[in-house]
Image: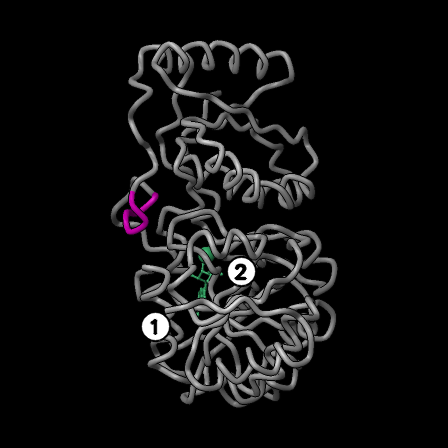
Amino acid sequence: MKTLRLDTNEEDIRRAGEIIRDGGLVAFPTETVYGLGADALNEVAVRSVYEAKGRPSDNPMIVHIAEASDMDALVEGGSFMLPIYAKIAAKQLWPGPLTMVLRKDPSVPGVTTGGLDTVAIRMPMNETARRLIAAAGVPVAAPSANISGRPSPTTPYDVLEDMDGRIDAVIMGDQCDVGIESTVVDMTGETPVILRPGIITKEWLEAVLGCTVEYDKSLLMKPENEIDIRDVNGMDTNTVVNADADTPATADAEFKPRSPGMKYTHYSPKAKVRLIAGDNETFGRRVMELGVEAKRNGLNPAILEYGNDAKKAAHKLFADLRELDRQGYDIIFIRAIEEKGAGFSVMNRMLKSAGYDIVK
Ligand code: AMP
Ligand code: MG
C-alpha cells in the first residue's frame, strides 16, 4: 500500500475525511500525539487499525469527536444521562487532552471498545484534528499511530517510520505540543478515576470538577524489579528488559487493570532504557559509572535529562527516544523526574519505556 502524504489545506483534509469515511486509515496530529484514525462505527476499519499497529485487540480505542454534542450518539442515554462531573469536564476541559470513559451506546461496536460496555471519548484541541473529524463526518477511533509497544509518534516523520506502507495516508502536520497521551478518566462510577495520567493532572481535574478524583490502583503499583547500584555493576548489560508488546508489564499475573491498555509494555525504543533517580551529584556519578560499564560491554550509551521540567519532558521524551534510536545508541540513561503534578504522568511513561528498570 502506498501511504499518501497529505497537507493541512482544505482539499487534503477533505480527502483525508473521505478516506476515513470509506473505511481507510489516516494518521493525523492532535495536541497530545499523532493518532491513527478510522471510522469508529465501522468494524472492518477498526480491525484494520489493530492490524496496522500489531496491537492486541482487547486494547480499546479512544473515539475522537469534533463537537461536544457528537458525544450524544455514543453514550448510553445521551448526554442527558451523564454524571454531573462528566458534564462539567466536557464543558470546561474540552476541547483538550482529556479522555472520558462513559457507558457506551449499543451502536458503538465492541471491536472499538475492546469488548467493554464503556467507550472512551475525547474532543481534541488541535485544529487539524478537529477539521479532519468534521470532514470525516463520523466519530474517529484513534490509538497512537505507532507500532504497538513503540514510543508514541509526535511528528509525521515518526509516524512514517512505523507506518509507511501500512496505512492509507498521513497528514503532515506540526510536532505535537503536549507530547504524551491524553489523561484518561473513568467517569462511570461515584468518583472519577484516572486510568492514564496526562498533562491534565489529578489536582487540575479536582479543581475544575470540585470533587475528589482518584488514581486507578495500577498507577500506584510498581513492579518490584527496582534494582540497586550493586546489582547493576554485576549485570549483563546486553539483556533486553523491554519485553514484547504483548507481555504484561507488571510482575503480578493476577492483576487486572481497569484500562486494558495499561497491562502492555509501552513506549519502548530499540535501545535499552534505564531510569536513574537521585540529586544532581548522584545522577552524575551513576551515569558515569554505568556509562563506563556500558562501553566496556561494547554498548554506545546516551543520556536524557530534563531536570524537573515536566512539560518539557512530556514534549520531548518520545521524540528524543526515537531520535536516539535513529542515531544508533544501544542504551539510554534517563534521569527520573519528580513525581509531582505532570511529573507523575511523565514518570509513568519513563517507567514503562524502561520496563520499570530504575536505579536508585
Ligand atoms: P491509545 O489508543 O494508545 O491512545 O490508548 C488508549 C488508552 O485508553 C488505553 O490505555 C486504553 O486502555 C484506554 N481506554 C480506551 N477505552 C477505554 C475504556 N472503555 N475503558 C477503559 N480504558 C479505556
Ligand atoms: Mg498508544
Vertical side of 248 occupied by 213: above or below? below
**Residue that label 1 marks:** 48
Seen at 37% across and 46% down, the residue is 265
Q: Which mark is residue 116?
A: none
Main secondary structure found in the magenta portion: loop
Toward the left, the furthest residue is 253
Along the line of sight, the residue nearer the viewer: 271 or 265:
271
Vertical side of 277 occupied by 74: above or below? below
Start-end of magenta stretch: 244-249
Residue 261 placement (x, y as % from top left): 39, 57
Seen at 43% across and 49% down, the residue is 218
Display colour scheme: one colour
**Residue that label 2 marks:** 193
- Quadrant of the snapshot with the N terminus: bottom left
Mark 1, secondary structure of its residue: helix
Vertical side of 10 occupied by 215: above or below? above
Q: What residue type is labelled 1?
A: Ser
